[in-house]
């Protein structure tokens, strides 16, 4: 469809779940879905069938006649998703679908989203500030910073762009250490953040003694260091220069007293 010239047809084939609740809490679960389906011109027979299908999908069929005002936050979110699916859209837009939900409910919503993507054959566009959510749900990810798409690719490709390993360290003089480390070709990226640095490298465990030698040569002491595989949070930091939540995070690492240690790799 031409999104400018065929707007009505486009709307018929997309579903939207907004970040803010848009349910009528004085109506029942079934009534909310029925009203929404009427707006799309679905017949009575189709409405009845789809209500059963989507409520089964989000595990709310036994609550179909319960007033929405008696629902928990997680149940309301599941109903929002069910409503967005009533007219069988080819594309579904989810805006922060688990914002404000507890960890257990978030995980349940993730499973429902995975299921509808598979069973309903629906393409899903999802916006989120939760990196673990994007990692779990998305095949392709675009990182947006101040309205600009910085990068877009598969999860694996994005993580590999940071390096096979990420080294995080806290030192006494980050400026001096950065100046010296920037001369090393084996470091793909150096990112300062607050009191610590992150380095994108290959075979991180092998590079730890080298980093200590370099730090010692420029009279910089390293108080803690950590080696791990890159996460999407590292990817966001790599492309934007800041972390997703824009706040200083506490890095909990083992204190290293000498370079003769064997760092534990987190998998």
Image: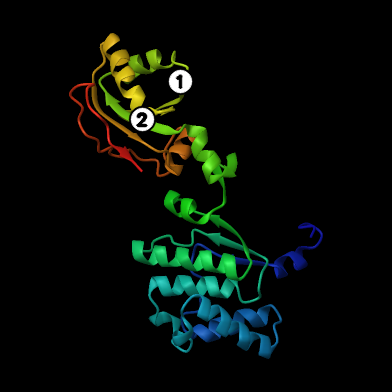
Residue 182 percent coordinates (x, y):
43, 16
Residue 94 percent coordinates (x, y):
55, 61
| Residue 2 vertical placement versus 179 (above, below) | below
Q: From the viewer's perspective, is 124 left or right of 169?
A: right
| Residue 135 vertical placement versus 76 (above, below) | above
- Extreme residue toward the top, this view: 217
134 or 96: nearer the viewer: 134
Which residue corresponds to the image point at 77% horizontal and 67% vertical from the top-left?
9
Q: Secondary structure at mark 2?
A: strand
- The Cα–Cα distance between marks 1 and 2, rounded to whole angstroms, is 13 Å
| Residue 231 vertical placement versus 11 (above, below) | above
Residue 201 percent coordinates (x, y):
43, 27
- Looking at the rendered structure, which numbered label has been put on residue 167? 2
Task: Please name the residue that numbered disc 1 is placed on.
Answer: 186
Residue 108: image quadrant is bottom left
Which residue corresponds to the image point at 37% horizontal and 28% vertical from the top-left?
204
Color theme of the render = rainbow
Residue 142: image quadrant is top right
The answer to whether residue 123 is seen in the rendering is: yes
186 or 88: nearer the viewer: 186
């Amino acid at each position: 469809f031409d999104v400018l010239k065929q707007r009505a047809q486009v709307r018929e084939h997309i579903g939207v779940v907004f970040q803010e609740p848009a349910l009528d809490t004085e109506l029942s679960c079934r009534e909310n879905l029925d009203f929404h389906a009427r707006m799309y011109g679905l017949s009575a027979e189709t409405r009845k069938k789809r209500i059963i299908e989507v409520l089964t999908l989000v595990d709310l069929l036994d609550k179909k006649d319960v007033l929405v005002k008696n629902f928990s936050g997680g149940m309301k979110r599941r109903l929002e998703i069910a409503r967005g699916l009533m007219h069988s859209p080819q594309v579904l837009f989810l805006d922060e679908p688990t914002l404000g939900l507890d960890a257990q409910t978030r995980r349940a919503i993730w499973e429902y989203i995975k299921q509808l993507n598979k069973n309903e054959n629906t393409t899903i566009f999802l916006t989120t500030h939760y990196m673990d959510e994007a990692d779990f749900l998305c095949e392709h990810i675009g990182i947006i910073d101040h309205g600009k798409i910085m990068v877009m690719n598969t999860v694996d490709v994005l993580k590999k762009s940071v390096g096979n390993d990420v080294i995080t360290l806290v030192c006494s003089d980050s400026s001096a250490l950065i100046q010296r480390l920037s001369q090393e070709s084996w470091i793909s990226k150096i990112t300062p953040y607050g009191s610590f640095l992150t380095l994108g490298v290959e075979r991180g465990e092998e590079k730890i003694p080298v980093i200590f030698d370099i730090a010692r040569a420029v009279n910089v002491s390293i108080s803690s260091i950590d080696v791990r595989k890159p996460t999407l949070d590292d990817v966001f930091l790599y492309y934007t220069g800041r972390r997703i939540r824009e706040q200083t995070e506490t890095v909990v690492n083992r204190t290293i007293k000498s370079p003769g240690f064997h760092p534990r790799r987190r998998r």
